[in-house]
Image: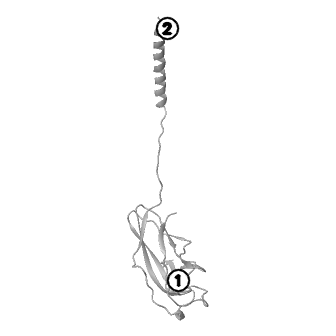
Amino acid sequence: MSKHNLIKPVLAAVICILGATGSASAASDATAQFKSSITVGTCDISFKETMPMSFSSKSIDATAEGKATEIKPLTTVVKCATANKPEIKLSGTVLPTKGMIFFDAKANSAQGFGFMVREDKTGLTAANFYSETDAVSPASTTDYGTVGVGTETEKKWMIGLVRADGTAESAKAGDVEASVKFSVAFK
């Protein structure tokens, strides 16, 4: 047998061995990839009441500092696309010395007056409404509770027209306005 004829069968055998080894190693492991995206919940928020909410005119002489002159109920309605436990965050301009009394500086000609927001609790009246510790401020969030999928869930609030405590000398009569944004937030 010639050298040429011997090389062909050896070469064919080597190619077969390499091919078998390659397919054996390809089948010994496989890699799977997994991908997802974790997002915060999606909820819509609205009010039951018609906006803007108007309060009656008050005499500056009839408004004591650290008191509400009038309170009104406000109901937020939250509806979520998925079951969630949202929180409500308020934002808006507040009095410089009272971080929980909302007012619009450009729209207000009154000084020392604004609007306070509180969760609705049994027994709230204008006489006992003013509480700097119980008021909702832009620095805090308020738990809304569990909201089911596609279910409208209500939360009751009280809004008070208040005269800030410590304004005996600086209070001034005029118009009072506040824009308060209620936003759905998640932990």
**Residue that label 2 marks:** 3
Residue 122 visible here: no
Residue occupying image coordinates x 51% and y 73%: 90
Task: Please identify the quarter of the rendering in which residue 98 is found.
Answer: bottom right
Gap between marks 1 and 2 measured at Cα: 105 Å
Foreground: disc 1 or disc 2: 2
Q: Which residue lies at the image location 47% right of the left edge and 80% below the top edge?
A: 158
Q: Secondary structure at mark 2?
A: helix
Front-most of 177 and 158?
177
Q: For the residue carrying disc 2, how many other residues have a C-alpha within 10 Å: few (<14), some (14-19), or many (20+)?
A: few
Q: Nearer the viewer, residue 122 or 119?
A: 119
Nearest to N terminus: mark 1 or mark 2: 2
Name the colour scheme.
one colour
Q: Position of residue 89 (x, y in %)?
A: 51, 70
Could you say whether the residue bearing mark 1 is in a helix, strand or loop? strand
| Contact, mark 1 vs mark 2 (Cβ under 8 Å) | no
Q: Amino acid at mark 2?
A: Lys
- For residue 92, the mark is none
The image shows residue 160 at horizontal and vertical percentages of 49, 83
Q: Is residue 161 above or below residue 80?
A: below
Q: Residue furthest top?
A: 1
The amino acid at mark 1 is Gly
Q: Where's residue 77, x and y in %?
A: 41, 71
- Residue 157 shows in this picture: yes
Which label is found at residue 114? Answer: 1
Residue 81, placed above or below residue 178: above
Q: Percent x, y for residue 59?
A: 50, 93
- Looking at the image, which is closer to me, 106 or 176? 106
Q: Residues within 10 Å of mark 1 (few under 14, many from 20)?
A: many
